[in-house]
Amino acid sequence: GENVEQHPSTLSVQEGDSAVIKCTYSDSASNYFPWYKQELGKRPQLIIDIRSNVGEKKDQRIAVTLNKTAKHFSLHITETQPEDSAVYFCAAQGFGNEKLTFGTGTRLTIIP
Amino acid sequence: KAGVTQTPRYLIKTRGQQVTLSCSPISGHRSVSWYQQTPGQGLQFLFEYFSETQRNKGNFPGRFSGRQFSNSRSEMNVSTLELGDSALYLCASSPPLGSIQYFGAGTRLSVL
C-alpha cells in the first residue's frame, strides 16, 4: 500500500520568513496530493492540493510543488504570520477511489 | 450548508467496554471516511464507506467496525476497548466525484 513520509516533524520559523515542509510517497500510481492544516483543537482543513498532471500550484502565500520522478512534493509558505502556526499534514491518493494516506504531520511554530 | 457533524464530542469508557461513534456527512456527500488521530501518529485510516458499502479498509483489528445508512450517516463501533484505543476519532465526507475531504470536529475517546 501507499506510504507517505513527512519531514520535519517540528519546524520553527521567524515571522516573515519562509517555511518548507516535504513529503515523499511510495506508490507511483498516486495522482492526488492535498495538504491539510490543523490548528490547535480544530478539525483538519484543506489549504491546497495538486494533481499529478501539474508541477506547481500557488494560492497567495502558499504553494505546492510536485516531482513525480522523485515521488516527492513540498509545501511552501512565504511571509509567514502568527496565524500560520498549526500542524500541517500532507497526503497522497491513488487513482480512482483509493484511500487517502496521510503523513505524520509537521508542527509549525511562527516566532514573533 | 451544515458541515460534518460528529457525536458525541467526548467519551470516557473503561477497558473491555464497547463504544459507538456517529458521523453525519455534509448533505449530498455519499462517501464517509474514518480516521484515528494520536500524537505522533498523524491520521491513521480506518475505513471508508460509500453508498452503504465499505469501499476501503485500513490496517486495524476486527474490533473496529463501521456501517453506513441509506441517508449516508455512518457509525463506527469499537468493541472490547483497550487503553491504546484512546484517541481522537475523525470522520470526513467527500462530494460525489470529488477527492476533497471535509472533516468533522471529532470524538475524543478516553479509555480508562
Image (cartoon, rainbow, N blue to C red):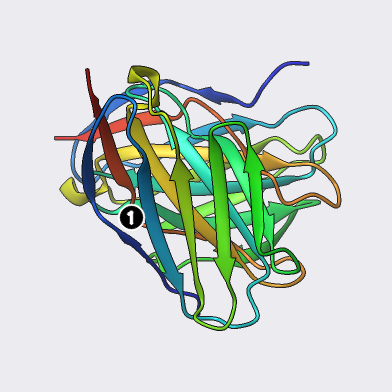
The foreground one among A73 and A4 is A73
Q: Quadrant of residue B41?
A: bottom left
The foreground one among B102 and A88 is A88
At which x and y percent is residue A101? 50, 62
At which x and y percent is residue B108? 33, 29
Q: Residue at x 79, y 49 (%)?
A: B98
Give the side of residue B39 with respect to residue B91, left or right: left
Give the side of residue A58 with respect to residue A91, left or right: right
A10 is higher (above) or lower (below) than A17: below
A104 is higher (above) or lower (below) than B28: below
The foreground one among B101 and A89 is A89
Residue A100 showing in the rendered view: no
Q: Quadrant of residue B60?
A: bottom left
Q: Residue at x 56, y 59 (%)?
A: A65
Disc 1 target residue: A104
Where is the C terminus of chain A found, in terms of image quarters? top left
Secondary-structure class at tag 1: loop
Q: Residue at x 51, y 77 (%)?
A: A71
Instruction: Report the number of numbered marks.
Output: 1
Q: Which residue is drawn at 63% across and 73% down?
A: A30
A93 is higher (above) or lower (below) than B104: below
At which x and y percent is residue B11? 32, 25
At which x and y percent is residue B59? 42, 69
Residue B9 showing in the rendered view: yes
Q: Decide: few, some or many residues near mark 1? Use Cα within 10 Å; few <14, some 14-19, many ≥20.
A: many
Residue at mark 1: chain: A
Amino acid on which the number 1 mark rests in the picture:
Thr
Give the side of residue A3 with respect to residue A82, left or right: right
